[in-house]
Image (cartoon, helix red, strand yellow):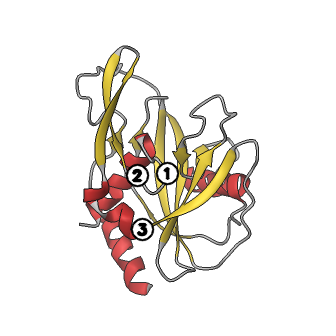
């Protein structure tokens, strides 16, 4: 796996612009001077089974925001978090039971602006040892993984649309089996795929 880690590290060090939920919708006017709240999500790449997989969560259907959607472990940066990386590691522990000292952080993707007003930093980390998954029942319905190769192949991404607030909105999807990965999660994964080409 050293080759994979070095390839990822090199890709993450490349300069590039951030992404947003508005990338495919340039007609949407963003408010000038809008304030975005910092957040961090963990992109945990597990190498324990030989083939690298990205660990993802299916959010609880009982949640008020984004119920049932596929997401990275993570969330907003709290006052007690040193930075967005600390926020991502804390949230991964709270949501899926990933010990904060286990992930080997190798870099970050550029920030992603969400329609809900967050400035999200995807923190990429390698997980090279097994751990006991403990999904937080109030937040997470399921934890699953997707082969990294599937997510790094641009041909697996599809642009779809739906109406939101009376406007047609385009967004990325990267389906895998029964899992419909879309929106911000798919957009950030597409950013990683683009860097790895």
Mark 3 vs mark 1, foreground winner is: 1
Q: Dot 2, crowdedness within 10 Å: few (<14), some or many (≥20)? A: some
Residue shown at 34% from the left, 76% from the top: 7
Mark 2 vs mark 3, foreground winner is: 2
Which structural element holds mark 1? Answer: loop
Query: Is 87 placed left or right of 32 in the picture?
Result: right
Marks 3 and 1 sit apart, C-alpha to C-alpha, by: 15 Å
The numbered dot on residue 71 is none
Marks 2 and 1 sit apart, C-alpha to C-alpha, by: 6 Å
Residue shown at 37% from the left, 65% from the top: 150
Residue shown at 68% from the left, 65% from the top: 100
- Across and down, in percent, residue 175 comes to 40, 51
Image position of 77 with respect to 51: above or below: above
Residue contact between numbered discs 3 and 1, judged by CB atoms under 8 Å: no
Nearest the camera: 30 or 187? 187
The numbered dot on residue 179 is 1
The numbered dot on residue 175 is 2
Q: Dot 1, crowdedness within 10 Å: few (<14), some or many (≥20)? A: few
Residue contact between numbered discs 2 and 1, judged by CB atoms under 8 Å: yes
The answer to whether residue 122 is seen in the rendering is yes
Image position of 134 with respect to 120: above or below: below
- Across and down, in percent, residue 101 comes to 67, 70
Q: Which sits earlier in the primary sequence, circle 2 or circle 3?
A: 3
- Across and down, in percent, residue 165 comes to 41, 16
Nearest the camera: 158 or 39? 158
Q: Which sits earlier in the primary sequence, circle 3 or circle 1?
A: 3
- Across and down, in percent, residue 140 comes to 68, 47
The answer to whether residue 15 is seen in the rendering is no
Name the image quarter holding the N terminus.
bottom left
Which structural element holds mark 2? Answer: loop
Q: Which residue is mark 3?
A: 148
């Amino acid at each position: 796996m050293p080759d994979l880690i070095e390839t990822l590290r090199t890709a993450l060090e490349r300069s590039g612009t951030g992404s947003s939920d508005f990338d495919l919708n340039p007609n949407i006017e963003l408010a000038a001077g809008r304030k975005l709240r910092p957040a961090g999500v963990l992109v945990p790449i597990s190498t324990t089974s030989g083939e690298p997989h990205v660990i993802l969560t299916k959010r609880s259907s009982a949640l008020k925001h984004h119920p049932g959607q596929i997401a990275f472990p993570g969330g907003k940066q709290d006052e007690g978090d040193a930075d967005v990386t600390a926020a991502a590691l804390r949230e991964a522990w709270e949501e899926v039971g990933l010990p904060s000292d286990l992930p080997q952080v190798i870099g970050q993707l550029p920030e992603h602006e969400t329609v809900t007003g967050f400035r999200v930093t995807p923190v990429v980390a390698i997980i090279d040892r097994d751990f006991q998954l403990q999904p937080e029942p109030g937040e997470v319905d399921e934890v699953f993984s997707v082969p990294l190769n599937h997510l790094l192949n641009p041909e697996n991404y599809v642009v779809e649309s739906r109406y939101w607030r009376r406007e047609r909105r385009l967004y990325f999807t990267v389906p895998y089996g029964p899992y419909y990965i879309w929106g911000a999660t798919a957009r950030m994964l597409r950013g990683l795929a683009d860097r790895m080409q």
